[in-house]
Image: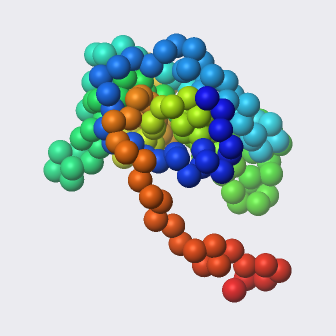
Amino acid sequence: MSQSFQELVRKRQSDRAYADKPVEPEKIERVLEAARMAPSTCNAQPWKMIVVTDPEKRMQIADACTSRALGMNHFSKQAPVQIVLVEENANFTSKFGGMVKQIHYPHLDLGIVAAHICLAAADEGLGTCMLGWLNEKKIRAILDIPASKKVMLVILLGYSTQETREKKRKKLGEVVSWERYL
């Protein structure tokens, strides 16, 4: 289903409604392979991706990502696949560089992985939504994630039932300057 990168970027959106249809394992594999190939600081690859398709676990994780009071992520039970991103330890050079520069590089690296997942999914005709509102302690318990690990995101994956929306973005001149900060 390959398309131009510019078309793909324009098509990808956060989808909040999913068809009651399973995602083919080969599509999930291609999405995961794209994520595995993501760049990372000093090639640390500080991530673990946990794919959840079991209906009972999906419902538990959806509950851990939902706030009824605030209306957060109420749609999360619809997606047939969840990919839980867990921060792993970075390698020595990434950690050392992060200490010197006072930057926690694994957060940047996991953001890149999340983008790869979402763009690869869009290329497969799938919708995604990244959920950062989550109860980390509950998700750790559901998936047997050690307490020493940080659950960063849950990415929903499935066949979207939403139309592609026009993106509302700032103009290029508002976010880009050349040769100096303007």
Residue pictured at 29% horizontal, 43% vertical = 73
Q: Residue at x 71, y 36 (%)?
A: 38
Q: Nearer the viewer, residue 107 or 35?
A: 35
Q: Quadrant of residue 181?
A: bottom right
Expressed as whole percent of the image width and height from the top left, the position of residue 13 reads 47, 47
Question: Which quadrant of the figure contains the N terminus?
Answer: top right
The quadrant the C terminus occupies is bottom right
Residue 141, image x and y in percent? 37, 23
User: Which residue is depicted at the point 45% across and 19% down?
Assistant: 23
Query: In the rendering, at what x and y percent does residue 66 appear?
Result: 26, 40
Please name the residue shown 56% across and 29% down the image.
Answer: 124
Residue 32 lies in quadrant? top right
Q: Does residue 113 show up?
A: no
Name the quadrant containing residue 156: top left
How many circles with numbers are drawn on the protein?
0
Q: Is residue 24 above or below residue 14?
A: above
How does the figure colour the protein chain or chains? rainbow
Image side of residue 153 versus residue 40, left or right: left
Q: Is residue 81 above or below residue 178?
A: above
Whether residue 38 is visible to the viewer of this picture, yes or no, is yes
Given residues 168 and 134, the one toward you in this image is 168
